[in-house]
Amino acid sequence: MMNFDFHNPTRIVFGPGTIAQLDRRVPANARVLLLYGGASAQTNGTLDEVRRALGQRDVQEFGGIEPNPTYETLMRAVALVRAERRDFLLAVGGGSIIDGSKFVAAAADFEGDPWQILESEGRSVHRALPLGCVLTLPATGSEMNNAAVVTRQATQTKLVFMSPHVFPAFSILDPTKTFTLPARQVANGVADAFTHVMEQYLTHPAGGLVQDRLAEGLLQLLIEIGPRTLAEPENETLRANLMWSATLALNGLIGAGVPQDWATHVVGHELTALHGIDHARTLAIVLPSMLQVRREAKRAKLLQYAERVWGLAGGTEDQRIDQAIAHTRAFFEQLGIPTRLSAYGLGAEEIEKVVAQLAAHGMTQLGERQDVTLDVSRAVLLASL
Ligand code: NZQ
Ligand code: ZN
């Protein structure tokens, strides 16, 4: 029987023109720190719209948070929060900005070394500053979850923390703000959201019939609208549905009460930390091989995926599984995302470095049954060459 406690306190304000609602959502007397990334939010006018909506509030700004946000940069924001007694954080950007802001929110009042937040996977977080978000890139689901991923540049360590204290209080999702995304980021967002669903769906049957159908619906939706969004970049309906599906892919709903995998993400994080490959691209490299190497443990769900998501009916069971994995790889490639390590200039000699980093970070028992050992991860990477 299923057993779960599902709670998500984040308010979602969705639709064109909703940035103006910041005025209602941010307390009038808040001492705001506005956090953003590189040039995109400025050049596409989002930052100006946010500044206008905040009106006469006491606002300071911290820009320059990089994709795959670093501890080193974020600690400068923490220093600013402390020095200027900021009491409300407003993140404007994609997953990197929201994740980085979650870390700043948790670190601002943290006693001791804030890296401990990552090392304890969030268990040492007992409070955080309130956080609001304006999302500009559908992908991570960070706008409606309690996870954040931070990289320590000095050691090339990319770790996740989770804490109930860092759920955003609200997130504003205006799909028209995503029109300026380069095709590569749109494709990345589709691949990331797709893999989030897979990490919570493609494990073993556990009686989560509701979760299965929701997951299959989201996968089919992404297969349908991912390539179309790339082909019709001005289509607002597609943009809106991509945005909402990416949020639902990782807001806890489809994963409540069912086994979860996440091995693809953990191996992918090492590839990003070592080689700077975009997060979603690492997933496209790892996921098809992960399914292949672990096909016996995942057999029942692979057959369900083949039939319900890809409509595969003929042939033997093993042929259907082969086809489902091939379709998954082809889907990423169709989005313009290469799925082989060699396409990123990486050869067999790099694999031991990735495995060594997994070992150094204690990532030796991954997956829904904790049976993805270093040997399994190595086999997955070899299958990704
Ligand atoms: O830096 P700027 O100039 O703002 O450009 C950004 C950035 O270069 C650009 N961009 C964002 N919105 C735009 C835009 N360009 C034009 N128009 C817009 N509207 O896009 C680039 C990538 O942004 P980033 O925030 O890095 O992308 P994404 O949302 O994919 O976030 C990736 C990060 O999230 C983590 C990843 O590991 C990675 O660090 N993840 C967080 C998760 C979570 N919190 O639950 C789960 C995920 O699995 C993932 O691990
Ligand atoms: Zn992801």
Image (tube, rainbow, N blue to C red):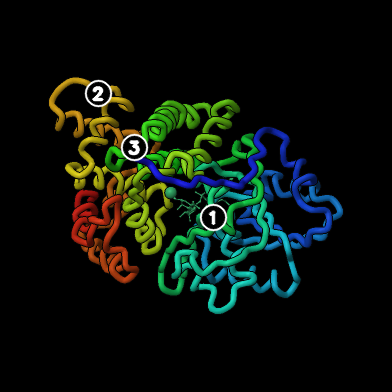
Give whichever of 6, 331 is nearer the camera: 6
Determine which residue is flagged by label 1: 96
Picture coordinates of residue 300 (x, y %)? 22, 35
Can residue 327 be seen in this snapshot? Answer: yes
Determine which residue is flagged by label 2: 312
Q: Secondary structure at mark 3?
A: helix
Farthest front residue in view: 1
Determine which residue is flagged by label 3: 333
Q: Is residue 109 left or right of residue 48?
A: left
Picture coordinates of residue 305 (x, y %)? 29, 31
Say how many tags the image has.
3
Which numbered disc flags the more N-terminal residue, 2 or 3?
2
In the drawing, what numbered circle is on residue 204? none
In the image, what residue occupies the spot 60% across and 59% down? 101
Q: How many other residues sit within 10 Å of disc 3, few (<14), some (14-19) or many (≥20)?
A: some
Query: What whole-number distance in Å separates the C-alpha atoms at marks 2 and 1?
Result: 37 Å
Q: Secondary structure at mark 1?
A: helix
Picture coordinates of residue 312 (x, y %)? 25, 23
In the image, what residue occupies the spot 27% across and 60% down? 365
Q: Is residue 306 left or right of residue 177?
A: left
Rendered image quadrant of residue 298: top left
Q: Are marks 2 and 3 in contact (CB under 8 Å)?
A: no
Q: How many other residues sit within 10 Å of disc 1, few (<14), some (14-19) or many (≥20)?
A: many
Q: Is mark 1 within 8 Å of ligand 1?
A: yes
In the image, what residue occupies the spot 29% across and 22% down? 311
Picture coordinates of residue 137 (x, y %)? 56, 44
Which numbered disc flags the more N-terminal residue, 2 or 1?
1
Q: Is residue 149 above or below residue 48?
A: below
Amino acid, disc 1: Ser
